[in-house]
Amino acid sequence: MIRTQIETIKQEDKRMDMEDGRRGEEIEVSKEANQIARIQANKPTNGSSTSKA
């Protein structure tokens, strides 16, 4: 059941990507930027893992 839900989500994502078409590249860039930002936010700035940037 979970597998079919995942497949459905993948299909919907594909359809949305096709609809976006022109924006596809933009979306990929922003996804990458979000990942980088998340990684940087998770890095401790002063050696303390509890500190917030």
Image: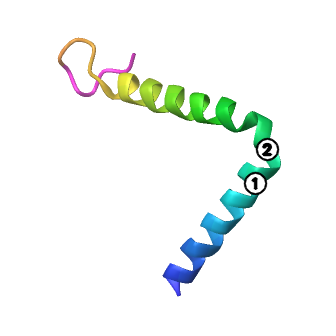
Element type where label 2 sits in the image: helix
Q: Residue furthest right?
A: 19
Side of 47 where 29 appears, left or right: right
- Give the labeled residue for mark 2: 20
The region drawn magenta spans 48-53
In percent of width and height, residue 21 lies at 77, 42
The percent position of residue 11, horizontal first and vertical second, equals 66, 67
* Left or right, residue 38 beside residue 30: left
Colour scheme employed for the rendering of this structure? rainbow
Per the model, the C-alpha gap separating discs 2 and 1 is 6 Å
Indicate the quadrant where residue 36 lies: top left
Q: Disc 1 marks which residue?
A: 16
Q: Residues within 10 Å of mark 2 (few under 14, many from 20)?
A: few
Crowding around mark 1 (Cα neighbors within 10 Å: few <14, some 14 to 19, many 20+) is few
Q: Residue at x 58, y 28 (%)?
A: 29
Contact between labelled residues 1 and 2, with CB atoms less than 8 Å apart = yes
Q: Is residue 52 magenta?
A: yes
Q: Residue at x 51, y 81 (%)?
A: 2
The three-letter code of the residue at mark 1 reads Met
Q: How many marks?
A: 2
At x 75%, y 59%, the residue is 15
- Which mark identifies residue 7? none
Q: Position of residue 4 (x, y in %)?
A: 57, 82
Left or right of 15, for residue 1 = left
Q: Nearer the viewer, residue 51 or 41?
A: 41
Please state, as top left, top right, bottom left or bottom right, where the C terminus lies in the image.
top left
Dominant SS in magenta: loop
Frontmost residue, 11 versus 51: 11
Q: Quadrant of residue 12?
A: bottom right
- Residue 44, position in %: x, y? 26, 21
| Helix, strand or loop for disc 1 | helix
Say left or right for 35 vs 52.
Answer: right
